[in-house]
Image: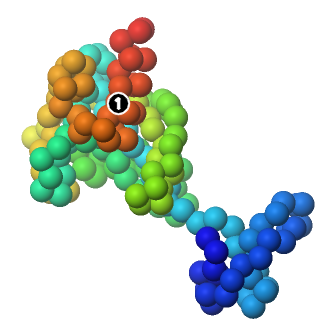
Amino acid sequence: MNNCYECGEKLILKIDNEGNKVQYCENCKAFRYPIFNTAIITAVVNKSKNKVLLIKQYGKSDYILVAGYVNKGESAEQTIVREVKEELRLDVIDYEYMRSEYFEKSNTLMMNFISVVEDDDLSNISDEVDKATWFSFEEARQNIKKGSLAEKFLIKILDKLESK
């Protein structure tokens, strides 16, 4: 960020109260800390941990992982439970944080989790999801959108689950 998001003035570097060099707007008299989105992306697995759920959304033909933005006042863990319930009508009974990665296209920090759901009934998915399908791990590797961040996260998760 080179310019203030409030007034458009050019930002300068200034030392804040904690001794950090931070961009500062002399016009607004305010420090301008980086702003970005935060989201979760999760590989939903069944209780037996031998199948993974991939979805299609927004009329696209590729399978992806369940993902969603973290709302104000919400933890990443709360977001997982909410997103899986909203999109798939499934109850998350366990989850594990894996890793994060910045996704430049949407200016988003993506936090990756494995989530385990109570049952595998897909008869009541929401209209936010075009299609949801349970896959074996090998089938999931073949069907996930190639070259995507979802594929990168999924491969790490499957490698971890298969090593147990």
Q: Quadrant of residue 138?
A: top left
Q: Is residue 3 above or below residue 97?
A: below
Q: Residues within 10 Å of mark 1 (few under 14, many from 20)?
A: many
Q: Quadrant of residue 33?
A: bottom right
Q: Quadrant of residue 2?
A: bottom right
- In the rendered image, the quadrant that contains the N terminus is bottom right
- Residue at point 40%, 58% (across, down): 105
Number of numbered tags placed on the structure image: 1
The colour scheme applied to this rendered structure is rainbow
- Residue at point 18%, 31% (across, down): 143
The front one of 23 and 40 is 23
Q: Is residue 125 above or below residue 159?
A: below
Indicate the secondary structure of the residue bearing disc 1: helix
Q: Is residue 11 above or below residue 158?
A: below
In the image, farthest residue toward the top: 164
- Residue at point 19%, 52% (across, down): 57
Residue 72 in view (yes/no): yes
Q: Which residue is mark 1?
A: 154
In the displayed structure image, the side of residue 35 where residue 69 appears, left or right: left
In the displayed structure image, the side of residue 58 where residue 13 appears, left or right: right
Q: Position of residue 140 (x, y in %)?
A: 22, 26
The front one of 62 and 87 is 62
